[in-house]
Amino acid sequence: MEEEIQNNKRIKKEKKYWDKLTPRYEPFIEKYWKIYPSLLDKISEDVNSEDIVLDVATGPGLDALKIAERASKVYAIDISEPMIEEAKKKAEEKKIKNVEFSVEDAYALPFDNEMFDTVICNSALHNMVNPQKALSEIRRVLKPNGRLIATIVGIGESHKFKLAMAIYKFFTAFPVFHKLNLDESANMIAKSGFTIANKETIKHPEDRMPILYIVAEMRIKNDFR
Ligand SMILES: C[S@@+](CC[C@H](N)C(=O)[O-])C[C@H]1O[C@@H](n2cnc3c(N)ncnc32)[C@H](O)[C@@H]1O
């Protein structure tokens, strides 16, 4: 009972801001995240055409719809109902058929073990109270040798960014729970049983904060030779 109360509190914390932001999500991205279109291109290039992909915390589905142009099938989940409604609307408008959106919690994914070639989590792990729980679920649903492509806003890359985010959070209640730099983000993912294949910091000159771009693999034991 107490666990259920705590879980509901956590879900409320994670989704409230995004529920409200849904109709303004695209203008929000355009204002604060100039890198977004090229970031989607980069993620998409890291996906193979025959891949079955899961997009965790898809928001209104912009990333999932982009990846669906390339991958064979995309499943995309988010904890916010308005975000998923918006994503479904966009898929219908664009007549994109190989993507399935549903409202789910990243901490309890409703998918079989070893179902996906690639899991994407674009700019969301720092917005989760306990990203390790999501990472453990991502690991469970990835095939052996499958890959996680995670991006995280690099708030921990400097004291200046940490301070700017603290001020922004104070005025907007923006749900950021982790202020990580590149190594801390990679270590968090590695601790969940992944092998880091690539980690880099990328930044658009007009954006305030960099994006931490991490590709992590689920290496099967034989690959450690
Ligand atoms: C910054 S948005 C990223 C959306 C999308 N990936 C993109 O790049 O446009 C963060 C998203 O994480 C979602 N989120 C937060 N906690 C979650 C959880 N536990 N399970 C699923 N989604 C979650 C929020 O609802 C929000 O839509």
Image (cartoon, helix red, strand yellow):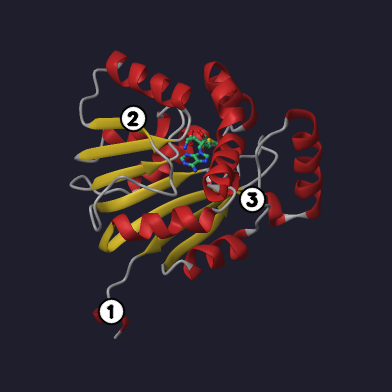
* Residue highlighted by disc 1: 221
Please say if 209 is above or below 118: above
Q: Is residue 153 above or below residue 19?
A: below
Q: Is residue 111 left or right of residue 7?
A: left
Report how far apart the C-alphas of labels 3 and 2 lie in the structure.
Answer: 25 Å
Badge 3 density bin: few <14, some 14–19, many ≥20, Cα 10 Å:
many
Q: How many marks?
A: 3
Residue at 40 percent of width and 29 percent of height: 61
Is 204 positioned to the left or the right of 36 in the image?
A: right
| 85 and 58: which is toward the camera | 85
Crowd rating for badge 1 (residues with CA inside 10 Å; few <14, some 14–19, many 20+): few
Sequence-wise first label, 3 or 1? 3
Residue 20 as seen in the image, left or right of residue 167: left
Q: Secondary structure at mark 2?
A: helix
Q: Quadrant of the C terminus?
A: bottom left
Where residue 88 sits in the image (x, y, percent)?
34, 21
Picture quadrant of residue 145? bottom left
Q: CA distance from mark 3 to mark 1?
A: 31 Å
**Which residue has dot 3 on it?**
154
Q: Cβ of disc 2 within 8 Å of ligand 1? A: no
Name which residue type carries label 1.
Lys
3 vs 1, front mark: 1
Which residue ends up furthest to the bottom in the rendered image? 225
**Location of residue 139 in the rendering, given as x and y in whole percent from the top left corner:** 36, 60
Q: Give the mark nearer the N terminus: 2 vs 1.
A: 2
Q: Position of residue 212 (x, y in %)?
A: 56, 52
Mark seen at residue 65: 2
Q: Position of residue 7 (x, y in %)?
A: 54, 45
